[in-house]
Image (spheres, helix red, strand yellow):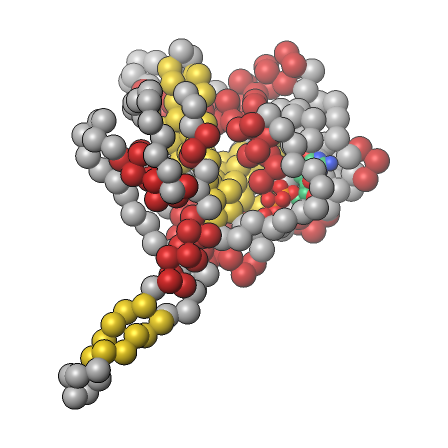
Amino acid sequence: MDDSWDTHRMNERWKMVSSDSAYMSSTEDGQTPTAITYPYNEELTHKTILVGDSGVGKTSLLVQFDQGKFIAGSFTSTVGIGFTVMLLGDSAVGKTCLLVRFKDGAFLGGNFIATVGIDFRNKVVDVDNLKVKLQIWDTAGQERFRSVTHAYYRDAQALLLLYDITSKPSFDNIRAWLTEIHEHAQKDVVIMLLGNKSDMAAERVVKTEDGEKLAKEYGVPFMETSAKTGVNVDLAFQAIGKELKHRATQQPNEPKFQIHDYIESQKHKTGCCGP
Ligand SMILES: Nc1nc2c(ncn2[C@@H]2O[C@H](COP(=O)(O)OP(=O)(O)OP(=O)(O)O)[C@@H](O)[C@H]2O)c(=O)[nH]1
């Protein structure tokens, strides 16, 4: 499915809308209308959901709003099964790069540009011959955006929590992130811990065993990834997709999907653990 249109710099868009917004009001004598302009508030997030029958034009309307263009031609029905995944972790751990690697197979090198607010991209993955749409929210790691991202936690079925193996503070903050997750996310949310930038072996300050130990303590799956080389990136999302799909479609007599076992078996298959 070509869903390249599915990137929505929501905050950028809201910024445009909000800064252009002027509400007319009357003065006390009821005669002279005055314009009240409200300043852009980056903490404020609005959600709008498009609903309606298949084919009525929900996607086209969104593309028109987001990109100002109409994509004519083939109609691809949005797939039926979909899940929301959020990327969390300190600023600069590589959340945006991980998402871009997974979505486009490319690495965003060069100057680091911190995410503002929140942004999402969609990717359809094949899980046991079923098309599963993952809507992946890339959050801003900076503290000042925390209240914006909190608003999205409860909609997420899975959370990928990242630290940077070359940054001890980003690893030390994982406990605080987990506390925050328990406060704001759904009780049964799927959590996975990722130690990113595994290609930077020379600068490593967090041992693989420390990541494994922490993950075990919280009972969450763990792997080291590299958005630069692509190591384990597909596996992380595939494992999440499988877990969510199994939860959604599992029959009572079916055995439970074992995400830890799946990851271990695939890691060994792909020889994952090198940089
Ligand atoms: N070597 C290496 N560099 C990476 C990797 N992932 C990200 N980076 C670099 O780390 C920096 C931060 O990456 P981002 O993806 O923007 O970080 P982020 O977590 O989204 O940051 P915020 O948007 O502020 O939350 C960038 O300069 C990337 O090029 C990786 O796997 N390996």
Q: Quadrant of the C terminus?
A: top right
Residue depicted at 19% across the width and 87% down the height: 28
**In the displayed structure image, the side of residue 44 where residue 194 appears, left or right:** right
Q: Quadrant of the N terminus?
A: top left
In which quarter of the view is residue 78 placed? top left
* Percent x, y of residue 180: 49, 52
Please indicate, yes or no, whether residue 254 appears anywhere in the rendered image.
Answer: yes
Residue depicted at 75% across the width and 42% down the height: 166
Residue extending furthest toward the left: 30
In which quarter of the view is residue 23 placed? bottom left
- Number of labels in the image equals 0
Nearest the viewer among 235 and 33 is: 33
* Percent x, y of residue 215: 59, 36
Please indicate, yes or no, whether residue 242 appears anywhere in the rendered image.
Answer: no
**In the displayed structure image, the side of residue 61 where residue 156 appears, left or right:** right
Q: Quadrant of ligand 1?
A: top right
Residue depicted at 71% across the width and 41% down the height: 110
* Percent x, y of residue 261: 54, 19
Residue depicted at 46% across the width and 52% down the height: 12
**Image: 7 above or below 20:** above
**In the displayed structure image, the side of residue 239 where residue 200 appears, left or right:** right
**Image: 150 above or below 1:** below
Residue extending furthest toward the bottom: 29
**Image: 101 above or below 91:** above
